[in-house]
Structures are given as structure tokens and as C-alpha cells.
Amino acid sequence: MANAAAKTYSNYDIFGEASVNIQRCHAVTGWRLAAAMLGVALSVISSRANELSEFNAAVEDAVAHQRIAIGYLRTDNIDLAALEIERARASWTALMAAFKTPPSPFRDRRAYETALNTTQSQLATALRRVNAGQTRLAREALASVRTSLSALRRANGVEVLADCVLAANAIMDAFFVYHDRPPDWTKAAVRSDVADKAQAYGHTVKHCDAIAPTAVKTNAEFRRLVDGAIASLALVPTAINQRDSDLLYRLLGELRAFDHLLAFRYG
């Protein structure tokens, strides 16, 4: 009887323990499966982020030549401008071959392909204009590359430094009207407008500084341009309070120079 009870208990103990072990096994397996799934998800996210970074870097490689070409056209250096446009076209052809499938943020494949093809066409047009001696039209074709690519990125929630610089350029254009047309300081609305434009430009420049890649942010040239613009903007309230048109004129000249250099180097 005792032996039977012991045997029964022993069987219960064995099966009970086996059941607990199975439950533990399931729990461990479930945890490992969840961890594996999380790892896969993080890997996919990292892969997509890397893909976007590589795409942005490839775009920057092409448009860097475009920016240099615009600079050469400003000084009527036709041959060097044509050379840089050819380099931009070569870089862009390589980009289109490497990124036939849009990086994940670009949801509309048709819009993505249209933007890339449009850029290719704009570069080809610019080269034709240069070879025909039509430098102004060539510059316009090259400038349109900036706006079309920026529109594509913004439509898909992507922002790079070039987009911020483009926005800063637009604000500077509006602010610069007071350079050759001194403000009527007697009007409160005009004083407020000068202050608002200065504030908007300063906010945008600081945003550009915030989103700039570390290598750019710490670059001496970039720091000189950004810090110089912010220093000039700091004196705008003085010009407003003292109703000093000459000071504002000088500050706008400095700001325009910084703005042009930001566009030439980083836009």
C-alpha cells in the first residue's frame, strides 16, 4: 500500500514536473520568438534608414556639381560650368541605376520616378543651354533642380540641409527688399515687418544648424556663415529702435552675402 502510494505520488510528481517544464519551454520559446521578431523589425528599420541615408548622399554628390556649375556660370566660366554639369549628369545616372526602387519614405513611386527623370532632363537642358552660350537659361535650369528635389522630399516628410537652405534663401529674398528701399520707420507696421522677417530668417538659419550633419556642423566654413548671420541678425533690433536705415542697409548686405554662400556651398 505504501509502495503503491509512493508509486502514485512518484508518477504524479514526474508528470506534474514535466507539465511545468513544458510550460517553461513554451514561455522561453515565446520570449525568444518575440526577441527575434523585434530584432528583425529593428534590422528592417535600420536598413531603411541606411537606404535613405545612402540615397541622400548620392543626391548630394550630384547636386554638389550642380552648385559649382552655377557658381562658374555667375562668372561666365563656360567651360568649367559645362564640365561640372557633365559630372552632375554622370552622378545622377548612377543614382537612378542604384535607386530604381524608391527608399521607403517615398511612398508614391510615380512621383519619385517623375522627380528623378525631371532632374535628369533639367541637367541635360542646362548643358544644352551652356553649349549654346545661354548662361542665364542654363542657370535657371540648374536652379530648378533644387526646387524639384526639395518638393519631392518635403512631400514625403524628408528634410535635408539643402531644403532648409532653400527655405532660408526665400526668406532672405523677402527681407532684402529693404536693402534698396529703406523702410518707413514712422509706420509701426513696417517696423514690425522688418522685425518679423529678421526673426524668421534667424529661426530658419538656426534650424539649418540644428539639422546639419555633424561633419558639416563642425566645419569651419559652415560655422563662419551661420554664426556670422546670427551675429548680424542680433543687430537688427538696434537698427529698428534707432530707426537707422544705414545700419540696416549694411546688415542686409552682410546677410545676403552669408545667404548666397550658404546656397552655393550647401543648397
Image (cartoon, grey):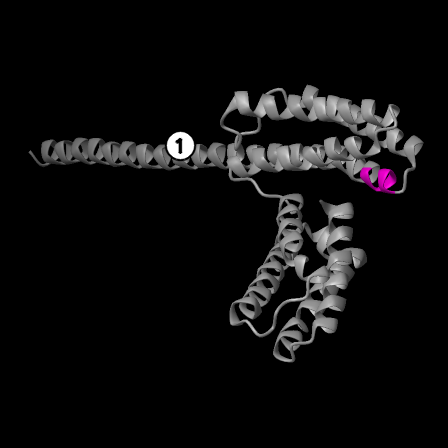
- Secondary structure that dominates the magenta span: helix
Q: What stretch is highlighted in magenta?
A: 70-74
Q: In this view of the protein, which residue sits in the foreground, 88 or 195?
A: 195
In this view, the residue farthest toward the bottom is 242
Q: Under tag 1, what secondary structure? A: helix
Q: Does 71 lie within the magenta span?
A: yes
Is 73 left or right of 204, judged from the image as shown? right
Is 125 left or right of 21, judged from the image as shown? right
**x and y percent of residue 251 in the render?**
73, 67
Task: Name the residue at 85% across, 42% down.
Answer: 74
Q: In which quarter of the image is residue 203?
A: bottom right
**x and y percent of residue 58 in the render?**
71, 32
**x and y percent of residue 104 in the render?**
53, 30
Name the residue tied to disc 1: 33
- Give the quarter of the figure containing the N terminus: top left
Q: In which quarter of the image is residue 141?
A: top right
- Give the quarter of the figure containing the C terminus: top right
Q: Does 64 lie within the magenta span?
A: no
Task: Name the residue at 39% across, 35% down.
Answer: 34
**x and y percent of residue 122 in the render?**
72, 26
In this view, the residue farthest toward the left is 1
Task: Name the residue at 45% across, 33% down.
Answer: 36
Q: In this view of the protein, which residue sits in the foreground, 1 or 119?
A: 119
Is 196 left or right of 258, judged from the image as shown? left
Above or below 188: residue 35 = above
Q: In this view of the protein, which residue sits in the foreground, 141 or 80?
A: 141
Q: In this view of the protein, which residue sits in the foreground, 261 or 107?
A: 261
Amino acid type of disc 1?
Answer: Leu
